[in-house]
Image: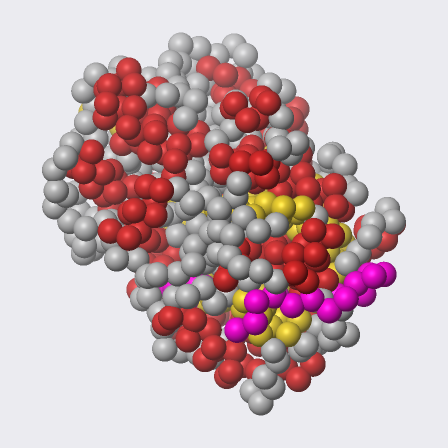
Amino acid sequence: MRPVAVTGLGVVSPFGTGVKAYWNGLSAGVCAIRPATLVDTEGFRCRIAAEVPDGIGGSPRRSRADRLALAAAREALEDAGLSRDERVEAALVVGAVGGGMLEAEAWYWERFRGRRPASRLAPGATLPFAHVEALGNALGLEGPRETLVTACSSGAASLALAADLIADGVVSAALAGGVDALTRVCFMGFNALKLLSAEPCRPFDRDRRGMSIGEGAAFVVLEDLERARARDVRIYAALAGHGMTTDAYHVTSPHPEGEGMVRAMKAALARGRIAPAAVGYANAHGTATPQNDRIEARAIREVFGAERLLISSTKSMIGHTMAAAGALEAVATVLTLVHEVVPPTAGLDTPDPDVAFDCVPRVAREAAVEYAISNSFGFGGQNVTLLFGRA
Amino acid sequence: MARVVVTGVGVVTGAVTGGRERVRAFLLSGGGPALSVPGSALQGLVDETETRRLSRVCQLSVAAARIALADAGLGPGAGLGLVLGAEFGDVRSTREFVDGYLGRGPAGLSPLLFPNTVMNTMAAATAIAVTARELSLTLNAPTVAGELAIARAAAAVRSGRVAAVLAGGVDEIDPFLAELLAEAGAVRETRGEGAGFVVLESRDGAEARGARVFGEITGAAWRALRARPYGVGHDSGSRALAAALHEAGVAPNDLGRVWISASGDGPRDRWEQAILEKALQPARPPQTALVPRVGRHSGLGALAVAAAALDDAARPALVHAIARGGTHVALVVRGQGEPGSQRVSGHPQ
């Protein structure tokens, strides 16, 4: 198996466009969760979300999600300095859930009310696979292409699959990440499940009331480590291992013992041949629902032991960005290693006594970490752990 | 690297529902198109609770997965992964969910329907039903989702990341979706519905448990050809075909048959022919398309791989599929010549 390096980063987040804006926001502990404007919140208990501010760019003929993805993907490719020829051979793996749903909803709403929609609906543009086609075509990526839907772990799983393609020698480089725009269906669905908090989410807080949703995109360029070195390009980190497991327990609830989460974390460590003690930070899935945070903390404790590990949830600042979450959090984890700063858990006032870890409340912490994990879990009991090491 | 063998197949389609023997009989029988899955096809394959709780597309997936595992003689338990391809997901539930809101406001939203709006709902239901606890992936692609899922699963077995995988896909015909596609001026092709899975295992693992191996995937690759989104391209130089044949150690002249993805979408079908001609020339192995008999859906990949494996040609077969947008997949499959097997053929093109 060939080792895999991270050589390019690109982000569009509720802090704006670009990796710099993202890291500035995270490291300052700024909460970007505000009253929602993209969807109608009338009649819902939760009326907030973390939306990407104006200035995404791109043609208005593209879906919002496509524009988010294109901006982040371009930044990652330029950061890695891949030539046109190198891009042609590169893989493209995108984690997605909503596709062009935001635009499809507007069309369907009009139609349902008996009005003639302002524009025609292109079914192909509404589905998750729309993004790989838009990115592949616009960026000249003609290697293996995949659209991965593993619910809220999609963004992380895309990095894992891309790493497999490199490790197996199928390609030397891959662009991988996740994207989701805010959609009515998502906002309404989590409201219906009563999982959304009326106030910005507070992961790992004793008084947490649920999650906040958001939107964004993040992409990374992964490369065969030896080739990256030969190109003399900046190596941010090594993607040292990953684990993907399934609970096979319940469609929306995680296994009560976090059994699948434990297996994912252990698989990532085993693949990287890294001892638990070498890991200093976990970017938690940390949705801020009472049940999920408690189960995740329990699973982390089973793998890494109590107390030693620093844990934070960057969802406290940018909300749960669905298919983008795993990729955005992977970038946050890589930047933690690079800057030697652990982003905080914003809004954490009173730590939950059931969470036996330092969850870095409110203020970022300087910490030189050798290895860090990023956890992502999704509906369907889909668990993904990514393990990153310092370059 | 492990050798990847096919030890089971399960399909639920309009024309055939069952494991390898039913598939073999279907391939030998000929017959016209049967595009919709009758309700009776699911009897005995999903229980009462599942009938009540699961959406129809999830039931199709669960049923096909159970048939495939039974065909493979593989019980539920540790070590099983799932890679499922789908083009549309659960459109019916998504529309019901949205209509609840549009009709009654927030009070009309069903928390039970919401998870079905996420395309991994079929994989989630199936993983629970058959206790697949290793990797579970849902791959979304037009036309080639099932073949792509099988190629990805074969790579996972080959590299030793998982011992056994259910690989295939599912789609259903939803009247609203059909109307939507027609309104949008979508291309005319023979669309069907159904689910299909093959069970892939390492040869060592399969032999150790005494499994009935009936095929081997000796090469698998997927790449993209340049094309506009959802469009047909002009480039016919296939790196996927070259990679799959190279991996299998097979020359075009060695191929006994090509199972193609022709579906009645004229421009796309012609593109596929150009790709095959360029990659295989001067060889012109006979071609077979299954779409005219069961329609295009994501369960078709498993049926094609099973057909290639059951074809008792002494020569390997190629399973090929290309989608609008440029994603294409090539699988080289070698039959194992099971006792009683005979040459099978689908609807010739």
> Which residue is at 46% across, 37% downward?
A151
The foreground one among A337 and B19 is: B19
Give the percent coordinates (x, y) of residue A94. Answer: 43, 51
**In the rendered view, would you say B99 is above or below A98?**
above
> Which residue is at 48% across, 51% downward?
B35
Please provide the residue range marked out in magenta. B323-349
Q: Is residue A116 magenta?
A: no
**In the rendered view, would you say B176 is above or below B190?**
above
Horizontal side, residue A344 vs residue A279: left or right: left
Horizontal side, residue A313 vs residue B186: left or right: right
The foreground one among A142 and B193 is: B193
The foreground one among B313 and A19 is: B313
Q: Is residue B134 visible?
A: no
The foreground one among B146 and A60 is: B146
Give the percent coordinates (x, y) of residue B140. Answer: 45, 50
Q: Quadrant of the N terminus of chain A?
A: bottom right
> Which residue is at 79% across, 63% downward?
B341
Give the percent coordinates (x, y) of residue A303. Answer: 66, 28
**In the rendered view, would you say B284 is above or below B23?**
below
> Which residue is at 61% across, 62% downward?
B30
Q: Is residue B347 magenta?
A: yes
Q: Hey, which quadrant is residue B255 in on the image? A: bottom right
Number of disc labels:
0
Horizontal side, residue B192 vs residue B212: left or right: left
Horizontal side, residue A17 vs residue A137: left or right: left
Give the percent coordinates (x, y) of residue B18. Answer: 67, 46
Q: Is residue B257 visible?
A: yes
